[in-house]
Amino acid sequence: MNKVVKRLSALTVAVVMIVALFAGCAQKGGNASGSGQQADTKSQGNITLKFTTWVNNKDLNGNYLDELITKEFTKQNPNLKVEFQLLTENNSNEYMQKTDLMIAGGEDIDVVSYSNRNEYADRVARGMLAPLDEYIAAEGKKYSDMYTLDTAVNGKIYAFPWDLKPGFVMMNKKYLDEAGLPVPKPDWTWDDYREYAKKLTKGDGKDKRYGGYFHTFSNYKIFPITNAYDFWPILKKDGTSNLLDPNIKWALQFMHDLEAVDKSHLPYFEAKSGKLSYRDLFFQGKVAMIPIGAWMIPEVSSTLDKYPHDWVTAFATVPKFKDYPAGATTGDGNFCAIPKSSKHKAEAYKLVKFNCDEGVYIRATGLPAKKDYNMDQLLKTMLNGKENLYDVASLKAVLGGVKLNSATNIFPYNKKVSDAVESEFEKYLVGGATLDSTIENADKITKEIISAGK
């Protein structure tokens, strides 16, 4: 009996020594996945949050702005550490694909972002995101008192908007001056835009400079009418199809005529098949103007290493559509959320809130969605000390006069509808279908998706 006890005692001591040895190794070395660091932070009573992004904008010292946000957050919350991960270089689509795979593979992510309402609503529909309502209630606040952009899906809040992306037209002022064209006034129309595009087009063949360009974003296929609605025009406010609205047909025809009739816009097929970058096209002077969003403002100065230039960028409001109000623009945003798989949701909520409040002045890639923001403080970061590259007067006029149509018709099937409609619209734009058949098929498919989603 004594021999058995002695053997068990010896075995116990050996096990304890092995466990201690491995624990010591883990504390000293860790591994590439960061598990050693996590064990260390837990032993100190700290929590490490993983923050992922695609935004690679930098300050004058070469620091990533999003990383500066996480550092400031840690300074104010010393018990919370943040692991910053730049997953792609300014490519939100690739970023969202990567985070989907990471979450599906069981990797720890505590804060994730989406570049538009359709992508965000799609992840809600897939059950990937945690609702934030209980954390908002714990603060004793209402969502509507904090932000101007409604992010509710089926009555619940799953994300905060870290900025708004109001549309406007960026213009190469050097080309405007050469053509004798003034920076447009806020009440200019799409007929005026069409004339500008014709006059700004120059040359032929490989050296041709186009007057304008609508990028291949799905919502840009009907960009000329999006500022006329206070909802996503593809669907009505009740979630049913709006594709038989004659304004949608007009927008597609207008886009087609700019390319095929006036030949003043870079063709959609060329841009899509060549996977062309709108940044390359504009900053390299290959197009004179682009309808785009507020995230591009700081890129005029923050991307000079890639796009060196000394000409000035001017800004104009989205052209007026028919009798609708001048200066109006849709208000999609970037959405910051917490994966349902996060092990630190309460702490991640603090980071989400910081990112969408104080963080907007550090990042400054769009207009804040938070209420009562400081425009001067925002512009200081946006212009990055390079005011000479901006027509500051036109920029202030555009941003100060934004009349935001904040779309609220967010449904779980938005992305499926958007993808299907985009596919049908493309057939028309590349010459593979008539306009009438395009509208008819898009409406039919949309109704089928909606019916299947109920």
Image: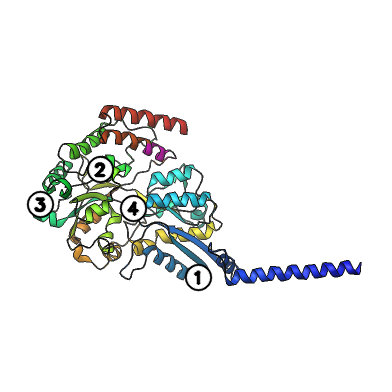
Q: Is residue 32 magenta?
A: no
Mark 3 vs 4, N-terminal side: 4
Q: CA distance from mark 1 to mark 3?
A: 54 Å
Front residue (pair 253, 130):
253
Task: Give the residue displayed 61% in from the left and 68% down from the top.
Answer: 26
- Circle 3 sits on which residue? 181
- Which residue was labeled with disc 2? 270
Q: Are marks 2 and 3 in contact (CB under 8 Å)?
A: no
Name the secondary structure under disc 2: helix
| Stretch of the chain drawn in magenta | 411-419
Residue with the mark numbered 1: 78
Residue that lies at the very extreme toward the left in this rendered image: 180
Give the spatial CA distance, label 2 vs label 1.
51 Å
Quadrant of the image occupied by residue 298:
bottom left
Q: Nearer the viewer, mark 3 or mark 4?
A: 3
Question: Could you tell me residue 106's position as x and y percent?
Answer: 55, 52
- Mark 3 is surrounded, within 10 Å at the Cα level, by few (under 14), some (14 to 19) or many (20 or more) other residues, namely few
Q: Residue 202, percent across and down?
A: 12, 48
Q: Separation of disc 2 and disc 4 at Cα? A: 29 Å
Q: What's the distance in space between the residues labelled 1 and 4, CA to CA?
A: 29 Å
Label 1, residues with CA under 10 Å away: few <14, some 14-19, many ≥20 = few
In this picture, residue 114 sits left or right of residue 41: left
**Label 4 amino acid?**
Leu
What secondary structure is found at the residue carrying circle 3?
loop
